[in-house]
Image (cartoon, rainbow, N blue to C red):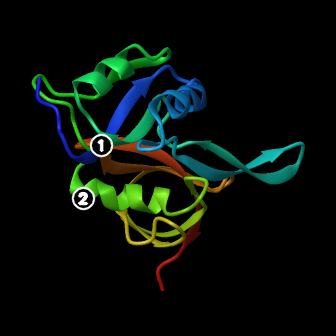
Amino acid sequence: MQLQHKECWYVLFVNTNQEEKVKEILQRTMGEEYKFIVPTRELRERKDGQWRNVKRRLFPGYVLIKGIMNVDVYYKLKKTPGIIKLLRSEDEVLTVDERELRVLKILIDNEDNNIGISKLYKQNDNIRITAGPLVGLEGQILKVDSRKGRAKVNLSFMNEERVVELGVELVDKI
């Protein structure tokens, strides 16, 4: 197995609904030289007739880690409760691709790693986000729930297509 000996972003697959707990354990045990994030997104939800903004995990079951990966760190991560595995191919640990770091940078440039509500254009099924923290990203709308102000959008992340539910304000093309 090949490991990177430079600082990179990696993805941990963890037990769903344990993301924050795993993040806290790792922050205590791994030290200051590593950064851990659990990206969230902001959505509008109606409860008891009132609209509220709520935060939900962007990638349920995943924690992102930035640091240097070596054999000791790899086995320390494997022994951490709640972690299922470090994403890897057959012969190497996968790092977050440079193209995808653009999306990640949007997430980590704000203090709470939260994606707010975005505005987007709908053109056929391909969209371009026109406002909000994901401005400029492109994807494909799979489903729009205008009553809830959400859209399920297909984005490329970690060399795979990921379906992400985003809070949106739809803007008609002029």
Q: Give the residue number, with chain letter if any, for mark 1.
A: 161
Secondary structure under badge 1? strand
Query: Which residue is depicted at the point 18% across and 40% down?
Result: 5
Q: Is residue 156 visible?
A: yes
* Image quadrant assignment for residue 158: top left
Q: Nearer the viewer, residue 141 or 111?
A: 111
List the residue tagged with mark 2: 99
Q: Is residue 50 left or right of residue 67?
A: right
Q: CA distance from mark 1 to mark 2?
A: 13 Å
Q: Nearer the viewer, residue 38 or 138?
A: 38
Disc 1 marks a residue whose amino acid type is: Glu
Mark with earlier residue (1, 2): 2
| Secondary element type, mark 2 | helix
Of residue 123 and residue 43, the one placed in the foreground of this image is 43
Residue at image position (81%, 54%) is 51
Quarter assignment of residue 14: top left
Q: Residues within 10 Å of mark 2 (few under 14, many from 20)?
A: few
Report x, y in % for residue 132.
54, 70
Q: Position of residue 53 (x, y in %)?
A: 74, 53
Q: Is residue 50 left or right of residue 122?
A: right
Q: Which mark is residue 118?
A: none
In screen coordinates, is 66 left or right of 20? left
Residue 29: image location, x then y, percent = 50, 27
In the rendered view, would you say 79 is above or below 125? Answer: above
Residues at discs 1 and 2 in contact (Cβ within 8 Å):
no
The amino acid on which the numbered mark 2 sits, given as a three-letter code, is Arg
Q: Position of residue 170 (x, y in %)?
A: 56, 68
Of circles 1 and 2, the one toward us is 2
* Total numbered labels placed on residues in the image: 2
Residue name at image x 23 percent, y 30 percent: 70
From this view, report whether residue 98 is shown above or below residue 2: below
